[in-house]
Amino acid sequence: MSESATSVPAATILMLRDHPTNGLEVFTVIRHHQIDFASGALVFPGGRVDAGDAEVRDHCEGAVKMDGAACAFMAGAIREAFEECGILLARTAGESDLISGERLATLEPYRDSLHEGKISLLEFLQKEKLTLAFDHLQHFAHWITPEMMPKRFDTHFYLAVAPEDHIAVHDGHESVDSIWISPQDAIEGADTGKYTIIFPTRLNIEMLGESTSVENAIEMAKARTIIPVLPQLESREDGEYLCIPVEAGYRVIEFRMEDIIKP
């Protein structure tokens, strides 16, 4: 039996807002069809945690009691959100409010520079005298790609309230479109074939849909015990099933592989 691929650290943010008529909405992007993972799928902004994400502890609000790995995941989540959708959960050093939309607009050129590795996250924060707002992130879920998959990720999901004056816009590289969408509309779109949603994303959207507002979603996440979800493959008489721990808190805990992997 061949050894399983090593899981790559990754992080993503469910950026939330309360819409006056549509209720709770989450910002999603549509992955470029040439991307080698989840191509064409509706996903939350996020991606791999870079080695440099672990270097920014001294430039983060709320990192005092965190270990290095937790710090890197949260820094990576904020950096990826900035690169992919243009929202930056950061403050000018010494200030209490998040940066304004006006200040954010001046930082726009850094999105490509960070994505292309022309500047590190630490260099960016030092140059612009910024601190990352870890205190605006709420841990929501932790998923690890099944061991039989050739490409694997160890992904932490976070909730965050989108600043009202930060305009979310997809990057045009890894993502080709974007949409604010309610959990109900996302699931309906997946069921009708309008959207492609991979099953970890779907389950987290369904869990988000149990909340009535941004505040409620954050409070429910705080009250829930977050455990690593590593789906396991089980062979049964009627086919193969992917199963997750009931303790993770999802309404559905098993899935037929033929329903997940469709031609």
Image (cartoon, helix red, strand yellow):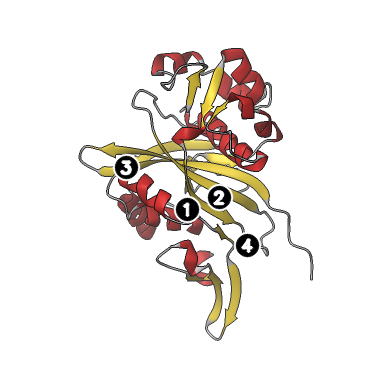
Expressed as whole percent of the image width and height from the top left, the position of residue 221 reads 41, 50
What residue is drawn where x is 52% and y is 68%? 245
* Up/down of 212 relative to 247, above or below: above
Q: Residues within 10 Å of mark 3 (few under 14, many from 20)?
A: some
Q: Amino acid at mark 4?
A: Pro
Q: Which residue is mark 4?
A: 146
Disc 3 or disc 2, which is closer to the eye?
A: 3
Q: Is residue 84 left or right of residue 6?
A: left
Q: Is residue 105 left or right of residue 7?
A: left
Residue farthest front in this picture: 65
Element under disc 2: loop
Q: Label 3, label 1: how many angstroms apart (C-alpha)?
A: 21 Å
Q: Label 4, label 2: how many angstroms apart (C-alpha)?
A: 15 Å
What label sits on residue 38 in the rendered view?
Answer: 2
Q: Amino acid at mark 3?
A: Glu
Expressed as whole percent of the image width and height from the top left, the position of residue 177 reads 44, 37
